[in-house]
Image (cartoon, rainbow, N blue to C red):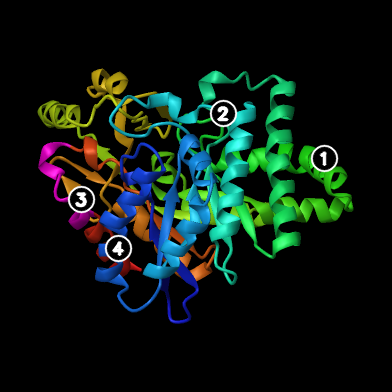
Amino acid sequence: MRLGPDGFFQLTYCTNIHPSNGWNSVLANLRRYGLPLKTRFAPDVPFGIGLRLSGEESRELLEGTNLPDFKSFLDEHGLYVFTLNGFPYGPFHQQPVKAEVHAPDWRDEERVRYTLRLVEILATLLPAEMDGGISTSPLSYGAWIDQNDPPTWDLLVKNVVRVAAAIAQVRQDRGKLIHLDIEPEPDGLLGTCAALTDFYETRLLPLGAPLLAEELGIPLAEAHACLLDHIRVCFDACHVAVGYEDPSQVLDRFAQVGIRVGKVQVSSAVKVLLPDDHHVRRETSTSLAAFAESTYLHQVVQRNRDGSFVHFPDLPDALPSISDPDAAEWRIHFHVPVFVQRYGTFASTQDDLRSVLALLRERRFTNHLEIETYTWDVLPAALKMDLLDSIGREYAWTLDVF
């Protein structure tokens, strides 16, 4: 739904919150949750949906009359789709995901085909007056890649450029502006916004612009601008906070390079301040153990008292180090509810999210906002509540703050 005095901003929530197994399951979830949320928050105006489709669900939606039938369903109920989550390809709930959330990565032909299917779906569903975004992975999981191997980087750039060429063609032929939004994530190949900026400067623009110019038959300068227009950033507030990155400085650096933000994901991480008191640390460790679940990776970035950082690939790897006297703070990749600020002896990065939203109001660096709290199923029992009411509280908090 539109926000702001002039309706510039679009707010939605990502349907990756809902377990699904096939297109019919996705549609059933929209009926069960999307329609009541529209009634609650946008009864008289169109209500936006941030659609997540697995690889198989994207295939199913393009079969037969499924896509035009879905468009009719959206129109009938006053819903619209302006952003897709194309990061997780496979199952995302009720079984271990961990690092496999990055598979297939951007070296794999199926990652390209999947993304192109999403382009076709969004080009069909996107209202004429809006731009649309497809968020995607940070190219790969960092541990899977030899970062000193030029052919690997060449392949990654080539495959991203293939999608850029396709969405540029969609804009020319169908008048729909779509962008692919790369999402930095802790321990991803592009694990921070700083790493993503470096990728643009050293690889995507110098290597990709000539490829795109040749593919589209356009001048190099036009290809450079085309890449910046169609390859953007998914700015996940949780991920930025876990990396201890300053949002204002990140945005300034993006502006220097010409990088555009396609979408802000409204999300919050776990923040733990580590006092000298060993008893409090033990209590905190006991509380955090409830968050060390088996479905998702919960990377931990430790800030030491001297300003240095230590990275742990998952929360169970970090817990034995909680007594480290050099450690001052932990930030944990766990998408906790944005409306909750404290969890007993530790907190969330809600204040960091507030700063991102304040910058967004001030600078208007994107018009897409997507609530992305997907860990309801794996939250400790004390934090669980009815899912519809939980999503509703996320909306209410965001609307109040924004």
Q: Which residue, given by chain and number where applicable, does mark 4 sit on?
A: 35
Q: Position of residue 53 (x, y in %)?
A: 45, 43
Q: Which residue, given by chain and number where applicable, does mark 3 sit on?
A: 387
Query: How far apart, in angstroms, are the residues tagged by discs 3 and 2?
Result: 31 Å
Q: Provide the residue span drawn in magenta.
A: 380-390
Camera-side mark, 3 or 4: 4
Q: Amino acid at mark 2?
A: Asp
Disc on the earlier residue, 1 or 3? 1
Disc on the earlier residue, 2 or 4? 4
Which residue is drawn at the image coordinates 70% and 19% (left, top)? 149
Tell me if residue 80 comes above or below residue 119 in the rendering.
below
The C terminus, quarter of image: bottom left
Please tell me whether mark 3 sits on a helix, a strand or a loop.
helix
Q: Which residue, given by chain and number where applicable, does mark 1 sit on?
A: 211
Please tell me whether mark 4 sits on a helix, a strand or a loop.
helix
**Left or right, 53 with reference to 111:** left
Q: Residue furthest toward the front? A: 64
Please tell me whether mark 2 sits on a helix, a strand or a loop.
loop
